[in-house]
Image: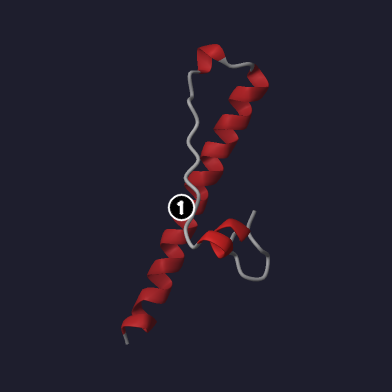
């Protein structure tokens, strides 16, 4: 969960890196709620990676100057 003020997760603030949770997605072995949870979590991780990449790009030019 990202902070509304900083858009940074508490994990990143405490550890200095983003967690990289990966789940085994053997869907044939999962219940429907578990499948939905994993799919939603994977989508959230993809969105966050995109957001982080965009933020890094925004800050790169000013940092280089």
- Residue 23 drawn above or below residue 31: below
Residue at the farthest bottom position: 65
- Residue 63 drawn above or below residue 49: below
Q: Which residue is mark 1?
A: 49
- Residue 38 drawn above or below residue 13: above
Q: Position of residue 3 (x, y in %)?
A: 66, 63
> The C terminus lies in which quarter of the figure?
bottom left
Q: Position of residue 28 (x, y in %)?
A: 52, 12
Rendered residue at 67%/23% (across/down): 33
Q: Position of residue 58 (x, y in %)?
A: 42, 72
Q: Position of residue 48 (x, y in %)?
A: 51, 52
Rendered residue at 67%/70% (across/down): 5
Foreground pick, 62 / 11: 11
Rendered residue at 46%/60% (across/down): 52
- Residue 58 drawn above or below residue 15: below
Q: Secondary structure at mark 1?
A: helix
């Amino acid at each position: 969960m990202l902070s509304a003020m900083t858009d940074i997760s508490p994990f990143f603030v405490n550890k200095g890196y983003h967690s990289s949770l990966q789940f085994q997605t053997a869907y044939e072995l999962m219940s429907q709620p578990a499948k939905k949870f994993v799919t939603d979590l994977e989508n959230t991780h993809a969105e966050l990676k995109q957001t982080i990449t965009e933020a890094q790009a925004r800050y790169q030019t000013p940092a280089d100057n």
